[in-house]
Amino acid sequence: MKTPRFLLPAATAGVLALTLTACGGGGGGGTTGGGSDAEANLEGRGPITYVQGKDNSNVVRPLLDKWNAAHPDEQVTFKEQTDQADQQHDDLVQNFQAKNENYDVVSVDVVWTAEFAARGWLQPLEGNMAIETDGMLEPTIEAGSYQDKLYTAPVSSDGGILYYRKDLVPEAPKTWDEMMGMCSIAKENNIGCYAGQFKQYEGLTVNASEAINSAGGSVLGDDGKPNLTTPEAEEGLNNLVDAFKNGNIPAEAITYQEEESRRAFQEGKLLFLRNWPYVYNLATTEGSSQVKDVLGMAALPGKDGPGASSLGGHNAAISVYSKNKATALDFVKFLIEEEQQKFFATQGSLAPVLGDLYEDQELVAKLPYLPVLKTSIENAVPRPVTPFYPAVTQAIQENSYAALKGEKSAEQALADMQKSIESAGAGS
Amino acid sequence: MATELGPTPVKGPASGGTPVHHGPKGVGEDNKILSQGKWATWLLAPTIIALGIVIVYPIISAIVMSFQKDAGLDPATGLFTAGGPAGIQNYVNWLGQQCAAPGGGTVACPPGTLGGQFWSATGTTFLFTVITVTFETILGFWMAMIMARTFKGRGLVRAAVLVPWAIPTAVTAQLWLFIFAFEGIANKLFNASILWTGSEWPAKWAVIIADTWKTTPFMALLILAGLQMIPADVYEAAKVDGATAWQRFRLITLPLVKPALMVAILFRTLDALRMFDLPYILTGGANNTTTLSILVINQIRQGFNSAAALSTITFIIIFLVAFIFVRFLGANVVEQSGATGKGKK
């Protein structure tokens, strides 16, 4: 009997393959224009839910208590996600696809804004739903907008800072060339000169975009199409490539994420470090830190002035499927009030979006990097605002990584990035 | 096992009075067997329904999705619109490494797109599988031979060997990431300055070493189970006949442990083909360590339907490998686990 003898292995193989492949199908792929949902329930009031990633420094709960005490009929419940950005993103996508009306106000990483807006999931903050944006730092508004329409309210911001050794460098470099010129000091002291984050991951997109933007180039043009085959972009990427080649960036920096680069700097092995504001606290308080008393901070160096940092941070958005949008809007406005912004800064070390707070004496005493950070954010360029962000960041990472390792020229890497991003935008 | 229900009735009465026949039009003219079959159907139904919901439905839904286009952007509104039916375009794109061209149609995927990584990811996946499974089989066999002996502290050794297997893979990966860091133990120990996660072959070896460390205990355990099935008197008889240690190993241990060994290799192979956590955390897929599973996950963020096509392709690849194992290499999982049910000898 041939058939059963043949069927049995096939069936067995099938079951094994099924149970062992973890069945990786995603959720449903339906999309909506979102027009009608965006007009519904604008007047709705009642209890709502606020969704955000893990509240590590306990800032959200005290704020919610404060709000709830004042609004007994419009209570806000906190839905806490994991601390992994990717998981937060996927959780939001799934709930938006399911049109979950219980995800009223959601915290959105700045780079997701365009994608969610283009899916029609976010309530445009215009007309009756508008918020006050006067006094906010311009780049934060830009990062919260998609096609000139504000979809998310900036809540916290973030920008890159150049940390340097005050004992070795008399004055912080203003431009990239000036900084490279100071690398001889590093050589004399037998330490590495400069490092950022160059492992192939999101941090590389941040660093490569900063290099390109600081040299006057841009990843996407004003029309949203890639604009990478320019001499400026090439100069920017080449700044990094050359520094790797001549050793100004130590070879091991190709494996650095934020933490590895911070450790190298704290152990006194680097003269300059590009990193986020969180480094300040650790570098000045950790017992093992070699740079406690000699830590200098400055804006990132650019072509002939401050460089263009990539912008980080989180914004608050209202779901179009929310039933109580009036309450949601009030809550969003509450989050961006000066008092709450101050609380975010003091309790959670989150950079405020209101420019005035950066000069607030009390805050500056607590967070001495604020003046530098303000320069950084004022000159910041949001990472490419595009609904195809995952594909765009993939293209930037993979190609700039190859260029930094010397596997292809900067020119070729940029041409490949250009083509990849064009392909992503062409839909598939 | 749900799948066993299909072919059974066809096979007819060969199994001589086994009780679990269920098909109404099957063998049993006998009323007793018929009613027993009905009972069996009812008793099995909840399991089959549960399996249908958690396995069959997602698979079919993924296959349906794989024939849909991913959402595209409407240039006028800037909003996404549903893609519509795609036919087999998603599959053609993956297998031919074709990407959407700006003017319509497709072009060869430029570097930096996921589409351009399909064949290299397939190659990497198989490379990892072949090397890690080979190492794990040899080391696992060796560990099993040691654990099978009776000596003082055997329980402790067995427990200690299991530790790597008990640690969650993500934690393992993070540990090895520290070990392979530039300032990490691996470089310190050998006084080297290798960029483990920063160049192609060191990165691949890092993944292979970490995976071997983690899953050899699993292999050892399955082989140990096989070794303990071999009765001691066989060895005694061989000794009396004057067989050397090598002869005993080659002529007794190997053939008798082969069924268990094949099952162990089959499980590990299928497991290795879906490797995800280790390379994802160690290298992020850089330096040509992207496996098929990593590619699927990355693609899910860029478009569900295309990702569904890719996971279907991955499924077919793993199915074929499993099929080859079961059909040609005699890894008979069913006979091992289901022998009581059917008696298909």
Image (cartoon, grey):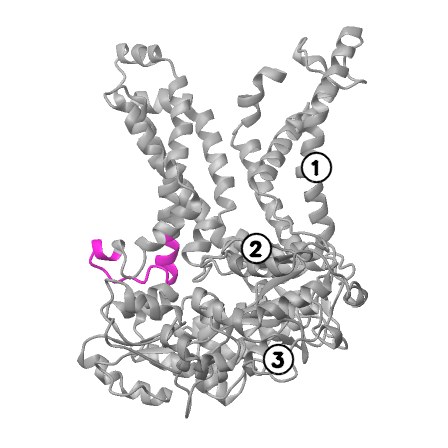
Q: Please provide the residue range marked out in magenta.
A: B187-206
Q: Chain of mark 2?
A: B
Whether residue B111 is visible here, answered yes or no, is: no
Residue at x 36%, y 69% (from the top left corner): A279
Between the C-alphas of marks 2 and 3, the distance is 37 Å
- The percent coordinates of residue B199 (x first, y second) are 37, 63
Residue at x 35%, y 31% (from the top left corner): B141
Looking at the rendering, which quadrant does residue A391 occupy? bottom right
Looking at the rendering, which quadrant does residue A43 occupy? bottom right
Reading the image, the residue beneath label 1 is: B53
Camera-side residue: B10 or A97? A97
Residue at x 36%, y 66% (from the top left corner): A256
Asked whether disc 3 touches disc 1, contact meaning CB atoms under 8 Å apart, the reply is no
Whether residue B151 is visible here, answered yes or no, is: yes
In the picture, the disc for residue B297 is 2
In the picture, the disc for residue A133 is 3
Q: Are marks 3 and 1 on the same chain?
A: no
Between the C-alphas of marks 1 and 2, the distance is 23 Å
Neighbour tally class for label 1: few under 14, some 14-19, many 20 plus, Cα within 10 Å: few
Neighbour tally class for label 2: few under 14, some 14-19, many 20 plus, Cα within 10 Å: some
In the picture, the disc for residue A4 is none
Q: Is residue A87 left or right of residue B78?
A: left
Q: Chain of mark 1?
A: B
Is residue A346 covered in magenta? Answer: no
Q: Quadrant of the N terminus of chain A?
A: top right
Amino acid type shown at disc 2: Ile
- The percent coordinates of residue A178 (x first, y second) are 32, 89
Amino acid type shown at disc 1: Ile
Q: Are marks 1 and 2 on the same chain?
A: yes
